[in-house]
Amino acid sequence: MTTVASTTDQFVSEFSISRWCDTAEVLARLDALLKQPIRPIRPENMSGVLSYFDTRCRQSKLVSAAAKDVIPGGVQHNLAFNYPHPLAIGAADGAHMSDVDGNRYIDFLQAGGATLLGANYRPVRERVQAVLAECGPVTGLLHEYEVKLAELVCRHVPSVEMFRMLGSGTEAVMAAIRLARAHTGRKWIIKMGGGYHGWSDQMVYGIRVPGTGRMDAAGIPRSSTARIQESFPHDLNALRRRLQFNRLRGGTAAVIVEPFGPESGTRPVTAAFNGELRTLCDEFGVLLIFDEVVTGFRTGLSGAQGYFDVRPDLTVFGKCLTGGYPMSGGVGGQRDIMMNLAGGLGGSQKKVLVGGTLSANPLSCVAGYYSILEMEKTQAAQHAGRAGDRLCAGLTEIIDRLGLPYVAYNQGSIVHLQTSGVMLMDARNPFKLLKLIQEAEARKRSMEEFGAAYCAHGLITLAGSRLYTSLADTDEVIDEALNRFEDVLKLA
């Protein structure tokens, strides 16, 4: 049985992160993982994993088969994809969820990181039910919880003087980019290669794997990505050169980053990176946009910007903003920039058009307001962060004891478990792109097989490589999870 030190009930810090990972050491271990052959689950053990889905998940298989007839690919959201077929979930509560066949799982997906308080958190649910009973989910007019939620966001997040609610993180990124261009009068936008900023036409560029440019841009005109650039992660000198070149062509409007590093910190930045990036943006008069869809409130009530003590010009929100309830997205920032979003007939001459009939609906706003109040009251980020530390320490101990090449690291409640390294590949050398694609397919398959094995052992993860902890993850939950993870890792 695997156990690690118990979590503490009293927290010194307001954040989920007890210490920032040694970035150089993590990247070195990930590089070593990529340089050796894949260590997948042994074929003779995969047959046992797949038999679980055949014998224990029959109703899920039927639902999945029906979905393929009417839904492209059989899933409505990429999180739902699972090898050999998606699980149909019937119930979720706290740290657990159950599928329609009655199988119970420890939930480390937590709706892609949105449910920091745990799944289907009752105090928030009851508040939402009361508002639904009073006025329904949407009226099209102003509701008091729009104001209450905006006031909470402005109070907790240092850089946000005004806040505008939108339908999703993708929409919020679109609005932030439009705002940056309108405010600066410039067109170029730079992102960190491999970062995920939603699926809008502009941001499906250099997505997931740095250097891939438009590889995933099917159906997107070249004109839509013509003013989007990617810079390789962690390389501020390369970013400086790009900013200098853009200055000769009208200048850069904004640099947009995930403050932990691309793909929710899968490629972690150094502790000093965001501060250095702020200085570089100031030097060139460029707006800095933090995409805090994942890190917002999960890191702490003031987000990653509070943890790093760096103030971006604009901040993108999602996920935890409404505690997992729908229509969760928003953008906030300095008053002079945000007033370009003013609705109605007022506002500035550089009026930036955004919309959305369901944006800032009463259901989403009451959920967000009370979710943040509950995070405040329960110290949810700190509890989830200690659970993440405990889970990561246990996984590292198992990996080392079993002599496996895998790598576990975390940023508080965001835990990464890399068994194939597919998320760490890059296309820095375009002449090796074909070989990269072939190797990526093999590594992706291995990652999917691990994801299936975790499911067969009662563990739900994000794509078999990322785990989100929550307030609901007690020491007992983490201990049980570590025993199950060890059973899976022994299959390799």
Image (cartoon, rainbow, N blue to C red):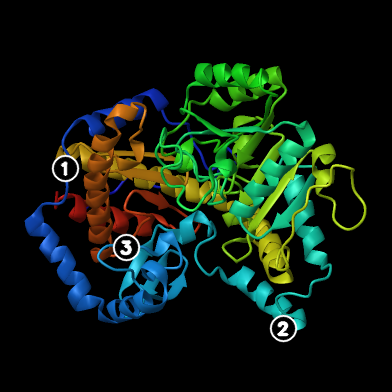
Task: Assess disc 2: are there few (<14), some (14-19) or many (≥20) residues with their C-alpha within 10 Å of its C-alpha.
Answer: few
Q: CA distance from mark 3 to mark 2?
A: 36 Å
Check if mark 1's residue and mark 2's residue have beta carbons within 8 Å: no
Q: Give the residue pinned by disc 1.
A: 39
Q: CA distance from mark 3 to mark 1?
A: 20 Å
Q: Is residue 461 visible?
A: yes
In terms of image quadrants, where is residue 326? bottom right
Q: CA distance from mark 1 to mark 2?
A: 53 Å
**What amino acid is found at the position of numbered circle 2 in the picture?**
Ala
Q: Earlier in the sequence, mark 3 or mark 2?
A: 3
Disc number for residue 82: 3
**What amino acid is found at the position of numbered circle 1 in the picture?**
Arg
**What amino acid is found at the position of numbered circle 3 in the picture?**
Asn
In terms of image quadrants, where is residue 185? top right
Q: Position of residue 211 (x, y in %)?
A: 41, 32
Which residue occupies the foreground of this view, 162 or 390? 162
Which residue occupies the foreground of this view, 145 or 372? 145
Q: Residue at x 73, y 74 (%)?
A: 138
Q: Position of residue 425 (x, y in %)?
A: 33, 35
